[in-house]
């Protein structure tokens, strides 16, 4: 049995006052939820205050990106030890917006992933095809390349700590959720790849989260699919009431 994981990726939204107001409402709302992992990925500048605010609740915090070097002359970057020291436990790696706007590649994904694992943080690796790739029937080959190159050199022990988020780019922020069947088809393929890379026992234990226009209306049906173990939620995680409903999805 894989434990569900629900992540709220705030992206570049909310000021500090809004972040803290959300935290106090959401913390109350999810007290007692003990059958899923809940992670908020706020802008990094709020990690320390939000980690404090969520103490004593089931909510963990994570960052949306970080740099692989430990310290030094890398203006504007944050290292694993920095984000750990302010309370982050999770890290998003290779989100499609990082790939699209900030030159993230499978190679840099791999460097970040190794640094995150070395530091004992929990990585959530994002993969997903663009619309033109889906239309050209390249979905599986794109995902396969993202996974093989992104995961290169990882040990089986490393792989056990991984969560993979499948986020088709055409579904992000567009209101066009992949149907549960489409998402399951790709998740099943990812599961097969992980099984072949790390062996069936580990491959079957890795959690696969779906992301792309997840809402309180579609979460239950998505989570009912065999290889959908969680969700990575953008827009619908910005409201604590809607994210609470997602976190409390109904088991079918
Ligand atoms: P939306 O839920 O807004 O489509 O965003 C998905 C996403 O990119 C989460 O990382």
Image (spheres, helix red, strand yellow):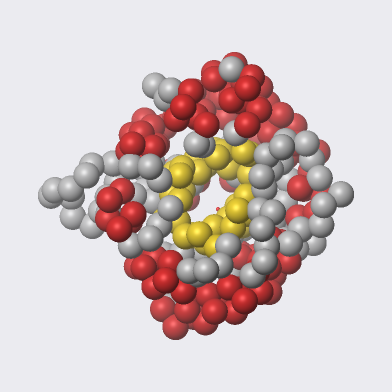
Camera-side residue: 153 or 57?
57
Compared across the picture, whether 52 is left or right of 131 comes to: left
Q: Looking at the image, which residue is at 64% across and 19% down?
A: 200
For the question of whether residue 36 can be seen, the reply is yes
Camera-side residue: 76 or 229?
229
For the image shown, how many numbered marks are present on the structure? 0
For the question of whether residue 132 can be seen, the reply is no
Query: What x and y, as percent, mark residue 147?
Result: 51, 28
Q: Looking at the image, which residue is at 41% across and 78% down?
A: 16
Asked if residue 46 is positioned above or below residue 127 in the image, the reply reads: below
Camera-side residue: 127 or 133?
127
Q: Looking at the image, which residue is at 60% across and 53% down?
A: 37
- Image quarter of residue 154: top left
Asked if residue 145 is positioned above or below residue 217 in the image, the reply reads: above
Query: What x and y, as percent, mark residue 163?
Result: 55, 40
Query: What x and y, as percent, mark residue 1?
Result: 71, 37
Camera-side residue: 82 or 179?
82
Query: What x and y, as percent, mark residue 59?
Result: 55, 63
Q: Looking at the image, which residue is at 82% across and 52% down?
A: 251
Q: Residue furthest right?
A: 252
């Amino acid at each position: 049995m894989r434990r569900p994981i629900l992540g709220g990726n705030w992206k570049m939204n909310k000021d500090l006052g809004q972040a803290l107001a959300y935290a106090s409402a959401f913390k109350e709302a999810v007290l007692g939820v003990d059958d899923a992992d809940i992670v908020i990925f706020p802008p990094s500048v709020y990690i320390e205050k939000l980690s404090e605010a969520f103490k004593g609740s089931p909510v963990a915090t994570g960052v949306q990106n970080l740099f692989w070097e430990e310290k030094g002359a890398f203006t504007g970057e944050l290292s694993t030890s920095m984000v750990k020291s302010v309370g982050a436990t999770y890290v998003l790696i290779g989100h499609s917006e990082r790939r699209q706007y900030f030159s993230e590649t499978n190679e840099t994904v791999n460097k970040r992933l190794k640094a995150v694992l070395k530091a004992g943080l929990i990585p959530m690796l994002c993969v997903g095809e663009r619309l033109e790739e889906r239309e050209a029937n390249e979905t599986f080959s794109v995902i396969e390349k993202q996974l093989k190159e992104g995961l290169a050199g990882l040990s089986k022990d490393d792989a056990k700590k991984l969560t993979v988020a499948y986020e088709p780019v055409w579904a992000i922020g567009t209101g066009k959720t992949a149907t549960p069947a489409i998402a399951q088809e790709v998740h099943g393929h990812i599961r097969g790849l992980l099984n072949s890379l790390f062996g069936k026992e580990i491959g079957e234990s890795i959690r696969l989260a779906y992301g792309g226009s997840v809402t309180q209306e579609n979460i239950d049906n998505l989570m009912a699919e065999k290889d959908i173990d969680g969700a990575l939620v953008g827009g619908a995680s910005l409201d604590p009431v809607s994210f609470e409903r997602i976190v409390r999805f109904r088991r079918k």
